[in-house]
């Protein structure tokens, strides 16, 4: 609510229920809706290559139009040292930050997005560094000892005279 401090009367009521709040850096990502259906729809069908093939011409068309507008605006307002929005969007797509930010916004699809777009190879133990691999065997031994003790306790508790 906004209240007039002199009369203490309510002058406005603000409904922020559907307000879109997110990190400003997300504006540097190219729009995901250029194909009208979200990337997660394509990724769920294991069609990452098809998505990229269809999306890249659209993003180039979009960024080309944005660059034309930016060039027109640059003639009117000089902003030295500032990177253009189109350059930031192009960088986001090139570096894969688009996918990281998209996964952050679409928490229900984060697993699909990770495995289709962000995962860069290797599986399981291959992803671990040498230190983590060295700690695996002692950790496994401790867990196996704990499992053995647990089974012994269960046997002692639940096998009494039945």
Image (tube, rainbow, N blue to C red):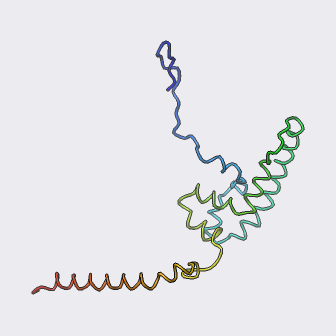
Residue 1 at what x, y percent from top left? Answer: 49, 26
- At horizontal 76% and vertical 64% (from top left) the residue drawn is 54
Q: In which quarter of the image is residue 57?
A: bottom right
- At horizontal 57% and vertical 57% (from top left) the residue drawn is 106
Q: In this view, does 123 lie above or below 16?
A: below
For the image, the number of numbered tags is 0
Residue closest to the far right = 75
Residue closest to the far top = 7
Q: Give the left or right position of residue 149, taking residue 35 as reference.
A: left
- At horizontal 16% and vertical 81% (from top left) the residue drawn is 157
Who is closer to the viewer here, 141 or 24? 141
Q: Give the left or right position of residue 80, taking residue 138 as reference.
A: right
Who is closer to the viewer here, 151 or 13? 151
- At horizontal 65% and vertical 46% (from top left) the residue drawn is 24
Residue 26 at what x, y percent from top left? Answer: 66, 51
Q: Give the left or right position of residue 99, taking residue 2 as reference.
A: right
Residue 149 at what x, y percent from top left? Answer: 26, 83
Picture quarter with the C terminus:
bottom left
Q: Give the left or right position of residue 1, taking residue 104 as reference.
A: left
Residue closest to the far left = 161
Residue 56 at what x, y percent from top left? Answer: 78, 62
Q: In this view, does 22 lie above or below 126?
A: above
Q: Is residue 99 above or below residue 15?
A: below
């Amino acid at each position: 609510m906004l209240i007039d401090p002199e009369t203490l009367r309510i002058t406005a009521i603000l409904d922020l229920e559907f307000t879109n709040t997110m990190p400003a850096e997300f504006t540097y990502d190219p729009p995901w809706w250029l194909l009208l259906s979200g990337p997660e729809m394509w990724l769920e069908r294991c069609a990452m290559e098809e998505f990229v093939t269809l999306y890249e011409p659209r993003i180039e068309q979009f960024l080309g139009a944005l660059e034309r507008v930016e060039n027109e605006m640059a003639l009117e307002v000089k902003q030295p040292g500032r990177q253009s929005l189109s350059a930031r969007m192009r960088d986001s797509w090139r570096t894969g930050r688009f996918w990281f930010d998209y996964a952050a916004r679409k928490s229900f699809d984060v697993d699909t997005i990770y495995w289709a777009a962000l995962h860069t190879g290797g599986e399981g133990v291959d992803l671990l560094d040498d230190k983590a691999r060295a700690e695996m065997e002692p950790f496994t031994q401790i867990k196996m000892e704990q499992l053995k003790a647990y089974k012994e306790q269960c046997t002692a508790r639940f096998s009494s005279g039945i």
